[in-house]
């Protein structure tokens, strides 16, 4: 029985580095590194959770194509339960071309593919039974499920006593709060990036943003701030949790790895602040290698990394 059920987008990532710009029309740009990995917010978070030793299953959708085969087999090899993954003949597996700049920052070219066909009807009630956490990875990346349909799934999970968590992607369709608000009524932990949180709330500072979202019945708001760490607001408390300093190779999936670290911390009974520190460590490790989760370590090694950084005085 999995501890965590991830509901999320599933993608095949084509990663190229370094890419500093588009070649001229009809031209060619040579890159030094090019590979394919399983990706997407849901996939990345599930893979990172499995690496951390959490029993995790994912429900999502891929196409009946070679890329779908690859994503499923890659996740299975990492220890993720993929028995609930659906296949469709109506679309190809979602694909993202990730252009990685020399400093590790990324630009994306994304095709929704099968994720656009993933609906509430594809999430059987039995999948919610017995799990401790339901995590939504990549909200705004599953157009037919985002909004009221996802809220109904979260409500059903809450009715079973399941902890609910949600991580957003950037909303390219501009729905923002119109789609998210129904879900906030059935969430325990909400963890957007600062950019996404600003777009959702209309606020600029972390404190104002957190105050806005804590008007909903959340246990905590966790704002991802990249190299600045994260800001956590829970109960009547707030804390800026500083990041761990590492050499950034590729920031792809760092936010998804962060989400995995936070969920793993909550599963262990950590406070939101402690879970935020673990999340910062998992996110930091993720950026040290090319690919969304290649740099993520197991829990023991992650804890050792945190201890070493602390003993060296790094933040």
Image: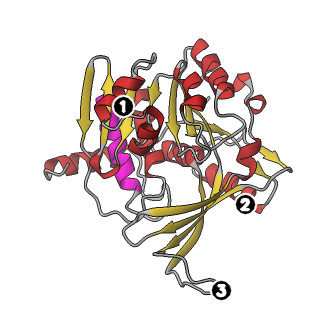
Q: In this view, does 194 lie above or below 99?
A: above
The residue wearing badge 3 is 26
**Can you see residue 242?**
yes
Percent across and percent down for residue 22 are: 54, 77
Say if 44 sits above or below 159 in the image: below
Q: Nearer the viewer, residue 304 or 98?
A: 98
Residue that label 2 marks: 67
The range drawn in magenta is 268-286
| Residue 54 on the magenta span | no
Q: Nearer the viewer, residue 159 or 206?
A: 206
> Which residue occupies 42% across, 34% down?
202
Q: Tag 1's secondary structure?
A: helix
**Residue 209 in the image, given as x and y percentages of width and height:** 36, 31
Density class for disc 1 (Cα within 10 Å; few <14, some 14-19, many ≥20) is many
Residue 34 is situated, as x and y percent measured from the top left of the image, at 56, 74
- The extreme front residue here reads 202
* Residue positioned 45% across, 30% down in the render: 190
**Residue 268 appears in the figure:** no
The answer to whether residue 107 is above or below residue 222 is: below
Mark whose residue sits in front, 3 or 2 = 3
| Residue shown at the point (32%, 29%) measured from the top left | 208
Label 2 and label 1: CA atoms lie apart by 39 Å
Determine whether 180 is above or below 10 in the image: above
Out of 50 and 32, give the one closest to the viewer. Answer: 32
Q: Is residue 234 left or right of residue 21?
A: left
């Amino acid at each position: 029985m999995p501890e965590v059920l991830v509901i999320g987008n599933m993608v095949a990532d084509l990663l190229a580095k370094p890419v500093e710009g588009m070649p001229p029309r009809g031209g060619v740009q040579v890159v030094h590194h090019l590979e394919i990995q399983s990706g997407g917010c849901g996939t990345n978070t599930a893979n990172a959770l499995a690496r951390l030793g959490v029993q995790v299953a994912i429900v999502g959708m891929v196409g009946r194509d070679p890329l779908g085969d690859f994503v499923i087999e890659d996740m299975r090899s990492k220890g993720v339960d993929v028995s609930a993954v659906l296949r469709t003949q109506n679309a190809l597996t979602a694909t993202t071309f990730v252009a990685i700049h020399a400093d590790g920052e990324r630009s994306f070219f994304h095709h929704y593919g099968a994720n656009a066909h993933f609906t509430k009807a594809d999430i059987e009630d039995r999948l919610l039974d017995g799990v401790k956490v339901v995590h939504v990875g990549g909200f705004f990346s599953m157009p037919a499920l985002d909004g009221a349909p996802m809220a109904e799934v979260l409500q059903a999970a809450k009715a079973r006593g399941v902890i609910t968590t949600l991580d957003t992607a950037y909303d390219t369709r501009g729905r923002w709060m119109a789609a998210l608000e129904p879900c906030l009524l059935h969430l325990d932990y909400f963890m957007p990036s600062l950019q996404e949180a600003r777009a959702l709330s209309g606020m600029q500072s972390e404190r104002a943003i957190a105050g806005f979202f804590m008007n909903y019945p959340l246990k905590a708001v966790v704002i991802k701030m990249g190299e600045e760490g994260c800001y956590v607001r829970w109960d009547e408390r707030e804390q800026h949790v500083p990041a761990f300093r590492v050499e950034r190779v590729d920031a792809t999936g760092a936010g998804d790895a962060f989400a995995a670290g936070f969920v793993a911390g909550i599963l262990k009974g950590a406070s939101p602040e402690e879970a935020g520190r673990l999340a910062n460590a998992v996110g930091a490790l993720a950026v040290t290698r090319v690919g969304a989760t290649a740099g993520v370590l197991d829990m023991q090694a992650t804890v050792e990394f945190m201890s070493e950084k602390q003993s060296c005085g790094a933040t």
